């Protein structure tokens, strides 16, 4: 088996079912986590596991958490999607899985999934995330990790990560997104993601939430007997300021305050993400966290999480952010202004089924020029409708058929690139390391 064949296998069941599904189908009609429940639970090595969900920032929290925990114990991390290579989804102590080990693990687990598929009715696919989760479990087991962190996909109810016997759950901010798959109402989305609170979860740590969302999370935690800790009540970030190439803040956890933490990620929301990760780290590590706080401070200054308000170039400024909704746009705009780039042009590479209108409206309200483009990745919908739709809403935007062409129009100007994660590989090809 080659690396490419191993990756193709991960998507093989999804590709087999895809022709029998419609784009408009709800999540539950496309994947069924019951197919992988037995194998995920059997392959799990035991020990401490964390499942992370939310509408935005779940990957950032998972990454920050892994680096903090890694100052005291060996920690494994599974995230998605990747930028350049599938291997980026699996890491232990900051090191990605090698091609050799990736191929070996896929070869080992392949027959188990074939048996599952042959027993199924083949109406819904074995999700690629289900196979990815088992790869992560085997990889973590081989490397003797003591803490395992798994990022959920778009939702939880039909996401295979829910099958991991998690010790802790994290719910970052929830807001309307993925309505087609998760449901039209904020309450539908909250109910889906609250499914991360399951029997066996000791505690759930939640970001600050809309009251509708928080009431659903509280009810779910109470029903499962899970302790719940909420941003703004049990922990929070304060005195948030922009500082060099990142942020500086104080973090309160209960009655304890850690002052002057510096994090090399841009945007006020990253301080809130840090508070969420640090509060759970204190729950897990206890006294070890306090003893290793000097090392934690060093690690936070070294964080590198591409595509999260990442500054690619300083003069003129080029920044890229995986922003596909209005709320994230506000963070990008605030950071742009903090960096003094008030004459910036915004390049939007946001798929048709995401909130490109909300992002464009926020950018337009602050008077910035907008250039629309598309990501090369064929899995995202870019059907040429955006410029006309924005025009009908009174928002002026130019269009270029590639990121490279859009950048040609903005030479010698600050540029902010907002879009789906798929655009990051194109940014990397143009600018090099991001």
Image (cartoon, helix red, strand yellow):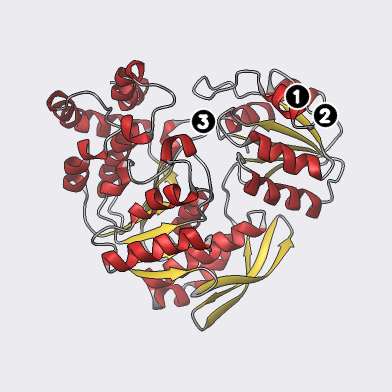
Mark 3 highlights which residue? 84
Q: Is residue 224 above or below residue 162?
A: below
For the residues labelled 3 and 1, the Cα–Cα distance comes to: 21 Å
The local secondary structure at tag 2 comes to loop
Q: Could you tell me if residue 313 is visible in this image?
A: no
Q: Which residue is at 36% across, 64% downward? A: 219
Q: Are marks 2 and 1 in contact (CB under 8 Å)?
A: yes
Dot 2 alpha-carbon crowd within 10 angstroms: few under 14, some 14 to 19, many 20 or more: some
Tell me residue 211's x, y (percent): 51, 63
Q: Nearer the viewer, residue 90 or 15?
A: 15
Distance between the Cα atoms at labels 2 and 3?
25 Å
- The residue lying at 79 percent from left, 39 percent from top is 364
The mark closer to the camera, 2 or 3, is 2
**Residue shown at 59%/21% (left/top)?**
382
Give left or right: position of 65 versus 381: left
Mark 1: secondary structure: helix
Do we see residue 40 in this rendering?
yes
Q: Which mark is residue 318?
A: none
Residue 281 place in picture, x, y as percent: 43, 67
- 3 vs 1, front mark: 1
Secondary element under disc 3, as helix, strand or loop, is loop
Label 3 CA crowd tier, 10 Å (few <14, some 14–19, many 20+):
few
Q: Residue 406: which numbered mark, if any? A: 1
Q: Which quadrant does the C terminus fall into?
A: top right
The residue carrying mark 2 is 410
Q: In the figure, 64 relative to 25: above or below?
A: below
């Amino acid at each position: 088996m080659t690396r490419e064949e191993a990756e193709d296998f991960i998507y093989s069941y999804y590709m087999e079912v895809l022709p029998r599904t419609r784009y408009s189908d709800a999540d539950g009609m496309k994947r069924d986590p019951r197919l992988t429940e037995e194998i995920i639970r059997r392959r799990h090595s035991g020990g401490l596991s964390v499942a992370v969900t939310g509408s935005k920032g779940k990957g950032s929290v998972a990454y920050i958490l892994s680096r903090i925990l890694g100052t005291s114990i060996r920690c494994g991390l599974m995230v998605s999607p990747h930028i350049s290579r599938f291997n980026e989804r699996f890491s232990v102590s900051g090191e990605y899985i090698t091609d050799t080990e990736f191929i070996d693990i896929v070869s080992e687990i392949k027959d188990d999934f074939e048996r599952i598929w042959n027993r199924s009715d083949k109406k819904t696919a074995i999700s690629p995330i289900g196979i990815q989760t088992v790869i992560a479990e085997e990889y973590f087991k081989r490397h003797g990790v003591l803490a395992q962190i798994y990022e959920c996909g778009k939702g939880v109810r039909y996401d295979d990560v829910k099958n991991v016997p998690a010790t802790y759950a994290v719910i970052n901010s929830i807001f309307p997104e993925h309505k087609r798959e998760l449901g039209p109402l904020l309450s539908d989305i909250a109910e889906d993601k609250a499914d991360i609170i399951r029997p066996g979860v000791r505690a759930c740590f939640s970001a600050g939430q809309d009251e509708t969302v928080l009431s659903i999370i509280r009810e779910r935690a109470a029903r499962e007997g899970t302790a719940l800790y909420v941003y703004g009540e049990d922990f929070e970030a304060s005195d948030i300021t922009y500082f060099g190439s990142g942020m500086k803040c104080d973090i309160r956890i209960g009655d304890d305050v850690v002052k002057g933490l510096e994090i090399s990620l841009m945007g006020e929301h990253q301080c809130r993400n840090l508070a969420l990760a640090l509060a759970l780290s204190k729950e897990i590590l206890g006294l070890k966290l306090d003893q290793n706080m000097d090392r934690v401070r060093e690690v936070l200054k070294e964080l590198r999480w591409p595509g999260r308000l990442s500054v690619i170039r300083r003069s003129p400024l080029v920044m890229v952010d995986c922003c596909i909704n209005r709320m994230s746009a506000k963070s990008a705009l605030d950071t742009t202004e903090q960096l003094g780039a008030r004459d910036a042009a915004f390049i939007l590479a946001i798929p048709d089924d995401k909130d490109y209108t909300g992002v464009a409206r926020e950018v337009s309200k602050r008077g910035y020029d907008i250039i629309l483009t598309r990501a090369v990745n064929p899995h995202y919908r870019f059907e040429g409708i955006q410029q006309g739709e924005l025009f009908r809403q009174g928002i002026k935007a130019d269009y270029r058929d590639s990121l490279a062409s859009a950048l040609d129009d903005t030479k010698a100007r600050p540029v902010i690139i907002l879009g789906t994660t798929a655009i990051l590989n194109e940014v990397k090809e143009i600018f090099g390391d991001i």
